[in-house]
Structure formats: C-alpha cells, structure tokens
Image: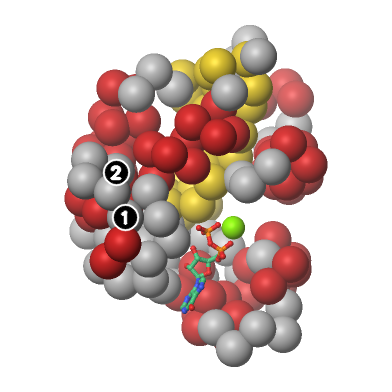
C-alpha cells in the first residue's frame, strides 16, 4: 500500500549541514520526498507536536532541542512508507541502531538523533496535517 509519513530532519542535523546527506539516504531507500520545508519551531509548537510525551522526564529537554535550530519537515511517500521509514531511521537510541540506518550513521545521542518519523497511520495523518496543507504536497 502506498502511504505517506511525516519526517523531520532535526536541529542536530541542520546545524551540522547534513540535511542533504540525510535526504540522499531517504531517496536511496526508495522513499519519495513529496513535500519539504525549513522552519523553526516555537516551544508551544514543539510541545503540541510531541504531546504524547508530555510529562515524561525527557520532555523539557526534547522541546529545548527541537527549538534550538531550524528543522526540515517533509512528507515521504512510498510502499509501506511509515514502517519503511522507521527501518531507514533505525532505533531511537543510536547506540543500538542497525548499521546503515540514518541514526547509526549520523545521530549523536538518544536526544540528538537526527530524524523523526511517524510511528503509525494515525500519527502520520495528524503529523502531516500539523505542518502541511494538502495543496503543499506533490501528488
Ligand atoms: P522516536 O523518535 O524513535 O519515535 P520516541 O520514543 O517517540 O522515539 O521519542 C521521541 C524523541 O524523544 C526521540 O526521538 C528522542 O529525541 C527523545 N527521547 C526519547 N527517549 C529519550 C530518552 O530516554 N532520553 C532523552 N531523549 C529521549
Ligand atoms: Mg515517536
């Protein structure tokens, strides 16, 4: 099934100027970038986006990091894109991520882990709508 998922290239990557390298890995794995923009999140936006993690010990740090520099938000499209992109990203903690994944290759730590990807069809729908109107997504 052709799906869409929401990807974020996080501040640790934009600040190291490796967004092109991350995009190259995404495209090499057959995921198509059908929408993309560079933005800077406010704290309120970051808190809303990551609302499922509100109250967890790492939440303040997560908001701090996600607002520390611009991010690239993108919609990826492809066969089983949600699950496929999670595989391309690798585990949340880069120390245990598989070889060849984005996080194994580029992440600095569990909190500076280079990329975000939606974890379910419901999250993908909410997260895409959070950043993009239908008119901004290439068919
Ligand atoms: P995911 O990004 O792989 O889906 P989540 O569990 O949804 O992982 O957590 C969201 C983000 O919060 C992670 O990507 C990471 O940046 C941060 N995070 C998650 N767990 C920890 C932790 O134990 N310490 C610090 N940051 C964490
Ligand atoms: Mg998650």
Question: What is the quadrant of residue 55 in the picture?
Answer: bottom right
**What residue is shown at x 38% (from left), y 49% (from top)?**
90
Q: Are marks 2 and 1 in contact (CB under 8 Å)?
A: yes
Relative placement, left or right, of 49 versus 65 is right
Relative placement, left or right, of 62 versus 91 is right
**Which quarter holds ligand 2?**
bottom right
Q: Is residue 45 visible?
A: no
Q: Which residue is mark 2?
A: 101
Q: Is residue 97 above or below residue 86?
A: below
Q: Is residue 29 above or below residue 57?
A: above
Give the image location of residue 68, x and y in percent. 43, 73
Q: Quadrant of the N terminus?
A: top right
The numbered mark at residue 138 is none
**What residue is shown at x 63% (from left), y 27% (from top)?**
4
Relative placement, left or right, of 123 versus 6 is right
Question: What is the quadrant of residue 131 in the picture?
Answer: top right
**What residue is shown at x 47% (from left), y 35% (from top)?**
85
The CA distance from mark 2 to mark 1 is: 7 Å
Q: Which residue is mark 1?
A: 97
Give the image location of residue 93, x and y in percent. 38, 66
């Amino acid at each position: 099934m052709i799906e869409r998922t929401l990807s974020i290239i996080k501040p640790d990557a934009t600040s190291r100027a490796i967004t092109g390298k991350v995009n190259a890995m995404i495209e090499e794995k057959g995921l198509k970038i059908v929408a993309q923009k560079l933005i800077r999140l406010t704290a309120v936006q970051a808190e809303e986006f990551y609302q499922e993690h509100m109250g967890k010990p790492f939440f303040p740090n997560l908001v701090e990091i996600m607002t520390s520099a611009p991010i690239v938000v993108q919609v990826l499209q492809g066969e089983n894109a949600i699950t496929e992109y999670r595989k391309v990203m690798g585990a949340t903690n880069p120390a245990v991520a598989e070889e060849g994944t984005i996080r194994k290759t580029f992440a600095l730590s569990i909190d500076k882990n280079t990329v975000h990807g939606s974890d379910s069809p419901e999250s993908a729908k909410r997260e895409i709508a959070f950043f993009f109107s239908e008119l901004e997504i290439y068919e």
